[in-house]
Amino acid sequence: MRPSRKHMNRREVLQAASGAVAGWGWARWAAATDMPQVTFPRATSGDLALEPDWEQRLVLSVGPRGADLAGDSEKPIQAAADYLARLGGGTVHILAGTYRLRNAIYLPSGVRLLGDGDSTVLIKEPSVQTTIAADSDWYDQEITLADATGFQVGDGICIQADNPHDGGKEVLKRTLVARSGNRFKLDRSLRKNIWTMKAPTVSTLFPLVTAEEKTNLAIEHLVVDGNREANAPLNGNYAGNLWFQDCSRILIRGVEARNNNGDGISWQVCHDVLVEDCYTHGNADLGMHPGSGSQRPLIRNNRIERNKIGLFFCWGVQYGLAENNRILDNTGQGLSIGHRDHYNVIRNNEIAGSGETGVLFRPERGEGFTPTGNLLEDNQIRDNGPDTGAAIDFQGITAGNTLARNHVLETRGSAGRVGIRIGEECGENTFTDNRIEGFATPIEDKRRA
């Protein structure tokens, strides 16, 4: 059931590239049910919700040869995206080939990346790291490296430091834009004090495809490879193979996000994100990370395999739908849901082979913080956790969730395994018509121990 990422022929590419906005999956979010139906849309200044179904849109091709822009790095891809943004948007068609990235591709609003399926591979170059050798204040736009070996003008970098005032963690992503010896100018000022007393580091770390405060984006039919073995780790709150912050209306379709020393696909405070027919696997942290505050994510028909955690609902993810996904062989939890993650529907998924727990309801900080109003229905939850583990684990004071018609199955032998574990502080959750088979203890209710 692996999503198809075939090599697309020229006709298929042209049909996909010149498709209308509706084909990008955006128009479905535009209309409220109580509004009059738009029967004859027009291109109107400032109206980003609806446009006519244009038969042809701007397309720029990028490739090693025979393309509008030639090259096999992030630079021609970025140039194409920026050109299209100036003209109101369009498609960057990345031809078959392997593209080695030394910086992120920053998507402007209204721009779509379209590859040739698994023939188009974006791979991150190996990272290098050094310490910062001279103080820089918050208003500075430069840093001095202890050892500049391996750093180049144009590189994406990540500065990590302890705040010299309160000890908090600082993570800054910038681009090196000029150089004299070990001194580099940055594309933006620091806005934080980076002082050597706290031993700050700088590394060539970045998401491969990213955007911040943008809208109407699409990434389709390509492979993004984080080159995990040759890169240092970076937390998914700051990067991933794909990483977005404060964006809305993002379509991610037919993408293979693999082998990152962090998250596969991560979005933070992003709304109306649609991820479908993707394959995210072999990532050191989270396969898919709908991040803090993200509203209405739609996650369907994906394979999420061999990550640390498969699908992780972060803080305040609400009104989302995860359906028809295969969440397999993740070393921690298959699915984790917690801090104020309310009113989500999780249905028709296969969650199997998780190292710790199939589905975890996190304990969080107590009253008012645990997830509620979520519905898990018609899922197959199979062979999860160690000998003494639980397939589904309710922790903390979690209450107000519903489990209906799930098949919770253990085929490896009962050992000390538990089907559903209810923590001693849990409130009332609803369990309806679930089949629980093969466990030493089908339901362990610690409230009654």
Image (cartoon, rainbow, N blue to C red):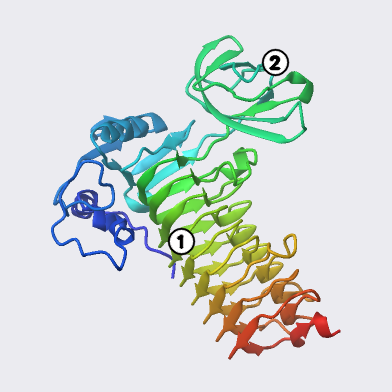
Disc 2: which residue: 135
382 w.r.t. 271: above or below: below
- Quarter where residue 38 is shown: bottom left
Q: Quadrant of the C terminus?
A: bottom right
Looking at the image, tell me whether mark 1 or mark 2 is earlier in sequence order.
Answer: 2
Disc 1: which residue: 296
Residue 106 in the image: x percent, y percent? 42, 36
Which of the two residues, 108 or 204, is positioned nearer the viewer here?
108
- Kindly identify the residue that appears in the image at 76 percent across and 27 percent down: 165
At mark 2, the secondary structure is loop
Q: Is residue 164 left or right of residue 48?
A: right
239 w.r.t. 76: above or below: below
Which of the two residues, 368 or 3, is positioned nearer the viewer here?
368
Q: Rate crowding at label 2 as few (under 14), some (14 to 19) or many (20 or more) other CA atoms within 10 Å.
A: some
Extreme-right residue of the structure: 449
Q: Rate crowding at label 1 as few (under 14), some (14 to 19) or many (20 or more) other CA atoms within 10 Å.
A: some
Q: Let me know if residue 100 appears in the view.
A: yes
Residue 126 in the image: x percent, y percent? 57, 34
- Kindly identify the residue that appears in the image at 65 percent across and 77 percent down: 383
- Quarter where residue 389 is shown: bottom right
Q: Marks 1 and 2: CB-CB under 8 Å?
A: no
At mark 1, the secondary structure is loop
Identify the amino acid type marked 2.
Asp
Which of the two residues, 38 or 157, is positioned nearer the viewer here?
38
Residue 61 in the image: x percent, y percent? 26, 38
Q: Let me know if residue 73 appears in the view.
A: no
